[in-house]
Amino acid sequence: QVQLVESGGGLVQPGGSLRLSCAASGSIFSINDMGWYRQAPGKQRELVASITNTGSTNYGNSVKGRFTISRDNAKNTVYLQMNSLKPEDTDVYSCNAVVRPFIRSIETSYWGQGTQVTVSS
């Protein structure tokens, strides 16, 4: 089994910053893409940012220029640095990782439990 544990969410004022972390553990042979998604109540889940195992990144249009995704492959950890936060960034942020648990297994997508980010004065 693979577990993803997120940390770093909380309450921040508009214009502030937060850094989210997501560490993968368990049966891991390799991790392909890792990413962050967010979903507000009643809305569809949307991509915030993703990063491949070689460092290529992709961002949602609403966060480009404000958020930065990075990863530490040695620690199986992905980070999301969020700057210039806006009230509309308020959401539950979930970590995703595409993991190959064993050398001969297929890749499987895993999700963290989600962490709340609230941007409010």
Image (tube, grey):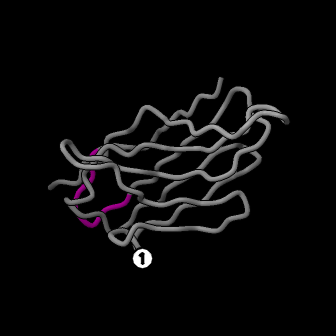
Q: What stretch is highlighted in magenta?
A: 11-17
Q: In this view, does 48 lie to the left or right of 55?
A: left
Q: Where is residue 66 in the image (x, y as percent from the top left)?
A: 39, 71
Name the image quarter holding residue 25. top right
Q: Which residue is drawn at 59% across and 28% down?
A: 3
Outermost left residue: 121
Number of numbered discs visible in the structure rendering:
1
> In x, y percent, where is residue 52?
65, 59
Q: Residue 17 appears at what percent x and percent y?
A: 37, 60
Give the residue at the far right of this rendering: 103
Name the side, left or right, on which 109 lies relative to 53: left
User: Residue 28 occupies which quadrant of the picture?
Assistant: top right
Tell me if residue 29 is in the magenta stretch. no
Q: Per the image, is 16 magenta?
A: yes
> Circle 1 is placed at which residue position?
65
Image: 64 above or below 93: below
Picture quarter with the N terminus:
top right
What amino acid is found at the position of numbered circle 1 in the picture?
Gly
Q: Position of 98 compared to 84: left or right? A: right
Q: Main secondary structure of the magenta part?
A: loop
Label 1: state its secondary structure.
loop
Q: Residue at x 48, y 61 (%)?
A: 49
Furthest toward the top, the residue is 1
Out of 103 and 3, give the one closest to the viewer: 103
Which image quarter holds the C terminus?
bottom left
